Amino acid sequence: MQITHFGHSCVLVEVDGTKILFDPGNFSHGFEGLTGLDAILITHQHPDHCDVARLPDLVAANPDAVRYADPQTTAQLNADDVAGPWTAAHAGSRVDIGSVTARVTGGRHAVIHPEIPVIDNVAYVVDAEDTTGRFMHPGDSFYIPFEKIDVLALPSAAPWMKLSESVDYLRAMAPRVAVPIHQAILADAGTGIHYGRLSDMKDAQTEFVVLDKESATQV
């Protein structure tokens, strides 16, 4: 499997000949020129995960890609006719994409503040031909699927979390490989501090891999 990080929460996963793009948001750059995608999957409606200004060109360049998003985002994109139609990804559903399957789980965004309404947020678990739980993108949540995940996209910094929670989530999930995402709100110096703490405090069996931006990495 190859993963390319386009910054923040946008990653391209290539596995068993299938190319899936997750969360093309407005803090991410470089995904605009992608072609040959099999799927575009969005976890939730926040603009750092779903850039409505750039979605039309992305979809136009990938007309055969299936398009799924959480139910609220799907309703908004279809109502505003943004690169649609989009299909709602409901927790518990499955999407066959080429030779792999994306299972939809989770359901709710992490709490930012009690006075801010909680929105939909789905997590995607990708099953490869020979490995169940080959990859998971949790969006803005610390959802635990209670199964073994091989490679985890790990939220590393956000208004809805503190670093200790990311450490606890990483330990609870105990993936073979963790790749940090959702770091765009950090300054460069802060990124190093966060990544260093996560790397130091992970379980011994987990490899912590910081992906080079816009460069495919084998994991």
Image (tube, grey):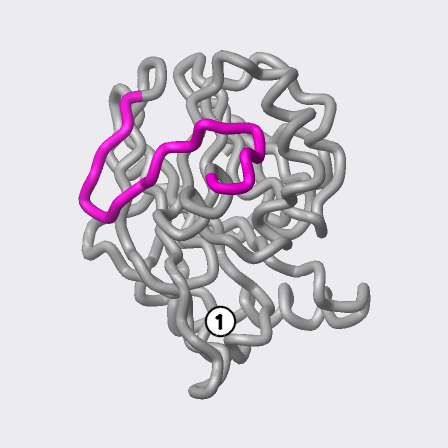
Under mark 1, the amino acid is: Met
Q: Which residue is mark 1?
A: 201
Residue 82, horizontal then vertical, whole percent: 57, 35
Q: What residue lies at 29% left-to-right and 56% top-to-bottom? A: 106
Given residues 154 and 110, the one toward you in this image is 110
Residue 103 appears left or right of 168: left
Quarter of the view holding residue 121: bottom left
| Magenta-colored stretch includes residue 85 | yes
Q: Secondary structure at mark 1?
A: helix
Q: What residue lies at 71% left-to-right and 59% top-to-bottom? A: 184
Residue 202, horizontal then vertical, whole percent: 45, 65
Q: State whether residue 210 is above or below residue 93.
A: below
Residue range corresponding to the magenta coloring:
79-96
Given residues 216 and 71, the one toward you in this image is 71
Per the picture, the main secondary structure of the magenta-coloured stretch is loop
Whether residue 139 is visible: yes
Residue 197 appears left or right of 207: right
Given residues 83 and 100, the one toward you in this image is 83
Residue 104, horizontal then vertical, whole percent: 28, 43
Outermost residue toward the right? 188
| Magenta-colored stretch includes residue 80 | yes
